[in-house]
Image (spheres, coloured by chain):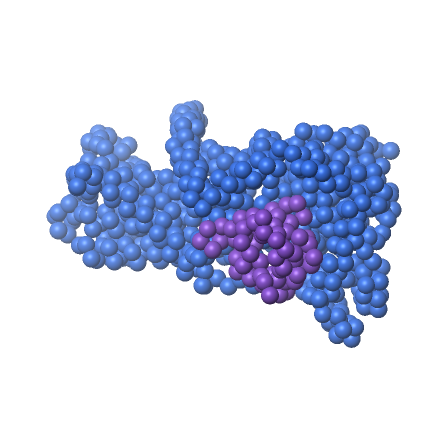
Chain colours: A blue, B purple
Amino acid sequence: MSNQVFKIALAGNPNSGKTTLFNALTGLKQKVGNYPGITVEKKLGTIRFSDDYEAIAIDLPGTYSLFPKSIDEEVAQQILCNKDNSDYPDITLVVADASNLRRTIFLLTQIIDLKMNVVLALNMVDIATKKGLIVDVNLLSKKLGIPVVAINARKGKGIEVLKKTLINSLDRSPDYPFLDVGKLFKGAIKKANIIRNVENNYASFMALCKQKLSGELENRCALNQLCKSEDIIPERAQAKETVNRYSLIDKLVKETVKQGEPIGKYMITRRLDDLLIHPFYGYIIFLLILFVIFQVVFSLATYPMDLIDGLFVDIQMFVAQTLPKGLLNDLVVNGILAGLGGILIFVPQIAFLFAFIAFLEDTGYMARVSFITDKLLRNVGLNGRSIIPLLSGAACAVPAIMSTRTISSWKERIITILVTPLMSCSARLPVYTLIIALIIPAEDYFGFNLQGIVMMSFYMIGFISAILVALLLKYIIKSKEYSYYIMEMPSYKIPDWKTVGYTIYEKVKIFLFDAGKIIIAVSIVLWFMSSFSPGDNFEKIEQKWKGHENAEFNINADKLEASYAGIIGKMIEPAIKPLGFDWKIGISLITSFAAREVFVGTMSTIYSVGDSNVKSIQTRLSELKNPDTGEAFFTPAVGISLMLFYAFAMQCMTTIVIVYRETNHWKWPFIQFIYMGFLAYVSSLIAYQLLS
Amino acid sequence: MQCLAELPIGSIGEMVRIFDNNLEQKLLEMGCTPGENFKVIRKAPFGGPVAILISSYILSIRREDAKSIEVIELRNE
């Protein structure tokens, strides 16, 4: 027989080691995407068994139950309840944390009752033993009527046995049911089966209790009628079923698990919690950890970033000199390679940030952070888990927004995504540095450097505006979901380095391939806008400067003025004049869209027109005169106005693309672009009009 | 009637019932069934969540939500 391919779905509670097992089974053969239309991560992988067998594994979202209350549970429920679903598995592999057996068996028996072919992987038996729990695996298997395999996903123990068991279970017909809802709600279930034209008591029971499910549209009316005639109140029925299920589970657990004295490990969690969620030290430690993360993402990442930057300059130089001069050369060097370099430059920050986040998640510390910050942040519409994205936003909004996936409440996640780009990211730094040097004297006031104080205030402006906007959005964004905070605080664990590694690999891959495509496309458009002009303007410019000293400098500047970007810059001049900007700044605002720091380069090119001396951008700008007044062009009013514009405006295509990728909708980046643009315009307008 | 939010740290209690429907289903599924014993182990500062040890794992619940959970205090350690 040739290759037989079948489907395996991995189900389990959060923190059960499901993802670790998924990684151990599939290796790097994984594909991560989104379920269509929603932002629940869909993870697929391939498991090779032997030459004859191969399985497609799907990692279902971690849930405690199949009753859909959150979007995660709905995804899991739809796949397991519907035989027509393209992901409907041949085998469902349930991963259980051996020390939380009571709770996991709940989910497990729900899946059994859906008539699924189930195998149970009992993970972390060693930790259970340390907690004094001894599980009788054979008896458990017999009582549940399914194969049970003890494994240790981290150490890779039991994986081969598990694989063999999976193959052997392919044609097994499951023992069913664990809890007979048909008996619990006699007539109703039978009739629901008839309405839905299936012979699956538990699936029909779920449909009866949750008529809002998308798959049940055609039967909704009939099921609703049935509830009324049979006197079934969905919430009560569901609660009754859950309580009944648990009483059976309690009996089962009593028979199969022996409780002894806990040893060692369990005490460690308590001791650590004494410190880490201490009402005073807890916050101090958290601030210290944030400081370290910020330092690393902000400063340590600059070394590999400079390396990538330098490498791309070299490649660009090499290609520019090797390829024949002309349009293709320019497209490759200034369009494609510049775009590619602009993407790769983000990789170190993404990798560093996710190394920390994966580490903190995997140890169990993140749950504690939520615990101590939940109340404080919820007051402003954020979540305990918003603090990491928010603070990392001070280095770069791109990895920060990618890290919001850990926020389970949809509303709090959207708010975090929307306000994170207000934090002063490192790309704003060169812009601020340049302008501050121009308009602020390097004097000391009360022993403080004035330039430093202004820089600091702009960081504060970013942070304060992020909090204020979050507070505003809390009242604007409507959410149907009730924001719960019912969270397990897992025992502390030594992080699994493989899991940390996979997370970094996965995030970098998503960024490079999903966002990279769009970013390259936009870079090419921007390149086109600044390297082409209508008609033969460019030839005329070249003619004009032929033979001049520093011809190339002047040609470039003139060309930029004549290009489409220049035309747009001039077109928007009336709109930005009240902010104190001229059309040259207008061009810089447009080219800055590729990345804020491009501002400095564009300014230095565009202001070099007609100047035959090579000067630093700073001297050049400081010598500029205002054609109307004859005084210096860069007055404090213009400078502050420009800095405020950069503080608020969404001038980063990479962030826009990432927001789209993370929200799965163009609506959110659009709203963000508009509100930030509005803030930028209004604050610049007020500042300029007041100061000038 | 006692609610979970009132119990001090160290109390051992028994779940009675949950008044909020959505909350009830979620907590039942996580093992907070009537009659189940638990221990209050932590309370976050500033009126933050409360953490209980139940079915051998630690569960944290918002203080506001803990007000709709009826419990009986059995003893205090």
Query: What residue lies at 69% left-to-right and 33% top-to-bottom?
Result: A126
Q: Is residue A431 left or right of residue A267?
A: left
Residue at the left extreme of this rendering? A630
The quarter holding residue B70 reads bottom right
Residue at the bottom extreme of this rendering? A229
Q: Against A417, is A206 above or below?
A: below
Query: What residue lies at 75% left-to-right and 37% top-to-bottom?
Result: A134
The x, y position of residue A112, in whole percent, is 79, 50
Q: How many marks can you see? A: 0
Q: Against A468, is A156 above or below?
A: above
The residue lying toward the viewer, choosing from A423 and A111, is: A111
The residue lying toward the viewer, choosing from A531 and A256, is: A256
The residue lying toward the viewer, choosing from A569 and A360, is: A360
Q: Against A547, is A69 above or below?
A: below
The x, y position of residue A510, in whole percent, is 55, 40
Q: Is residue A331 left or right of residue B74?
A: left
The x, y position of residue A129, in whole percent, is 70, 35
The quarter holding residue A200 reads bottom right
The quarter holding residue A613 reads top left
Asked whether residue A412 appears in the rendered view, the answer is yes
Query: What residue lies at 60% left-to-right and 61% top-to-bottom?
Result: B69
The x, y position of residue A174, in whole percent, is 85, 47
Query: What residue lies at 29% left-to-right and 56% top-to-bottom?
Result: A683
In the picture, the quarter occupied by the N terminus of chain B is bottom right
Asked whether residue A561 appears in the rendered view, the answer is no
